[in-house]
Amino acid sequence: MRLKSAIFVSALLRRAQVEGAYGVVVRRGSEEAGAIFVKVSRLDGTAALYGPAPQSAFDEGFPGDRLFSVLVEPGRPEADADARIARELKFDPDIFVVEIEDRAGRHFLDLAKD
């Protein structure tokens, strides 16, 4: 059973806060199963964007885990991440968008192995 999106987002924001980063929900999606996108701003005009990993990245032993993939590489202009989020919203308007501000660029997510 997969953790509800709203609970996962709350835990992510709490983890960021505990580590000294600032996080906020920019857009609230489906409480139960909305896709989650995380923008990490380094506060220097650059950002990275992380989104749900493809199904092929999941281990059959733990199918309920939430894994993320890099959608916009760290160090890219923040506008690149914003443009990708806009495209995702056209495809699925029921997504969560979380923004984390952290000068070190920490995302606090589990990334899929390439």
Image (spheres, rainbow, N blue to C red):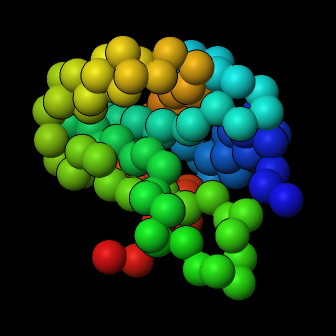
Horizontal side of residue 74 vs 76, given as left or right: right
- Answer whether residue 53 is visible to the viewer in this image: yes
Q: Position of residue 78 (x, y in %)?
A: 22, 29
**x 24%, y 51%: residue:** 74
**Looking at the picture, how far across and down is residue 34, in whole percent?**
64, 32
Q: Which of 93 and 73 is in front in this view?
A: 93
Quadrant in which the N terminus appears: bottom right
Image quarter of residue 56 = bottom left
Viewer can see residue 82: no
Seen in the picture, residue 31 relative to 49 is either above or below; the reply is above
Q: Who's the residue at 63% across and 58% down the image?
A: 66
Work out whether residue 52 or residue 56 is closer to the camera in this orientation and state it: 56
Tell me the residue at 32%/76% (across/down). 114
In this view, 76 is above or below 25: below
The residue most toward the right is: 1
Q: Is residue 90 positioned above or below 6 on the image? A: above
The residue positioned 55% from the left and 25% from the top of the image is 95
Percent of width and height locating residue 14: 74, 43
| Callout count | 0
Expressed as whole percent of the image width and height from the top left, the position of residue 58 reads 55, 72
Q: In this view, does 23 lie to the left or right of 53?
A: right
Vertical placement of residue 59 versus 68, above or below: below
